[in-house]
Amino acid sequence: MYKILKKTQYSEKVYKFRVQAPQMAKKAQAGQFLMVRADKQGERVPFTFADWNPEEGWVEFIFMVIGKTTQMLATFQEGDRIQDLTGPLGNPTEMEDGSWCVIGGGVGLAIAYPVARMLKSSGHDVDVIMGARTEDLLLLTDQFRELVGDEHLHITTDDGSVGEKGVVTLPLERMCEAKSVDHVFAVGPVPMMKFSALTCEKYGVPITASLNPIMVDGTGMCGCCRVTVDGKTKFACVDGPDFDATKVDWNDLRARQGSYRTEEGQALKDYEEATCACHK
């Protein structure tokens, strides 16, 4: 079992756990992920590494409360133990020469940060575009600002509560038009990645997307995480999670993401009812 060393709450539904996992911390790389099982009866859920420290022996992941497992995790406190962590899984993000723009949307900002940090540490010029529906849902703003500076940090919110009102493709298109970026990395909601890909394709700028489809085992055996890339079936857990965003079948991916929505809703309802009964 894995001890929670630190719990951070960013908003009503977004949390970060720092978990003791010394062997995992020694191997983790930007872009990889881990599988989490909260208890013995729990499902396995993938989360990308938000940070890690091989010297101190911990890894961090960020999650948003959406379904049964994430709601259960939100009740855990510092000192509690998570049943299982498996990782690192997936392939590290490839970082070619040239200038980069790293785009993160919502909880995807937790994935974008270690990628941007690794790019900076290896000498790349990096711009960051942060996107969210509202200011309250932006993550790691101070960390991104410290990493790349105000000049290279672009913030968009749907409601205009901070930064530029609108979506991430607004500053992205300006960069592509100015030819100030050689490569783009995007992670976040499927519509955000899809339209970022269309924008980059319009200007001939390569773009990589980090995909997080439904997973069960994380080792390529179950087939749940299959995605269509360039007309071929790929498995995000072993072939990815990074893919050429211009070749992803985004409509298929979005449809597959909703495959178990009914079952997920029922599982959450059953968990909430059982929790309420226990407190009576």
Image (tube, grey):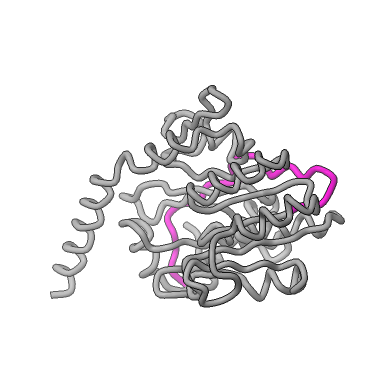
Q: Position of residue 215 (x, y in %)?
A: 44, 40
- Is 92 colored magenta in this rendering? yes
Query: Which residue corresponds to the image point at 67% horizontal and 67% vertical from the top-left?
Result: 154
Q: Farthest top residue?
A: 232
In x, y percent, where is residue 250?
A: 48, 38
Q: Residue at x 60, y 73 (%)?
A: 163
Please give the name of the residue rendered at 51% of the width and 65% of the height, measured from the top-left corner.
132
Q: Residue at x 69, y 44 (%)?
A: 93
**Residue 218 versus residue 127 in the image, above or below:** above
The answer, for residue 8, to whether it is visible in the render is no
Query: Which range of residues does the magenta coloring cover?
Result: 79-100
Res 49 quadrant in image: bottom right
11 up-or-down from 268: above or below: below
**Quadrant of the image containing the C terminus:** bottom left
Residue 145 % position (x, y): 71, 73
Residue closest to the eye, 38 or 237:
237
* Placement of 250 over or under 192, stated as above or below: above
Looking at the image, residue 171 sits to the left or right of residue 81; the answer is: right
Instruction: Residue 254: say if magenta.
Output: no
Q: Is residue 268 visible?
A: yes
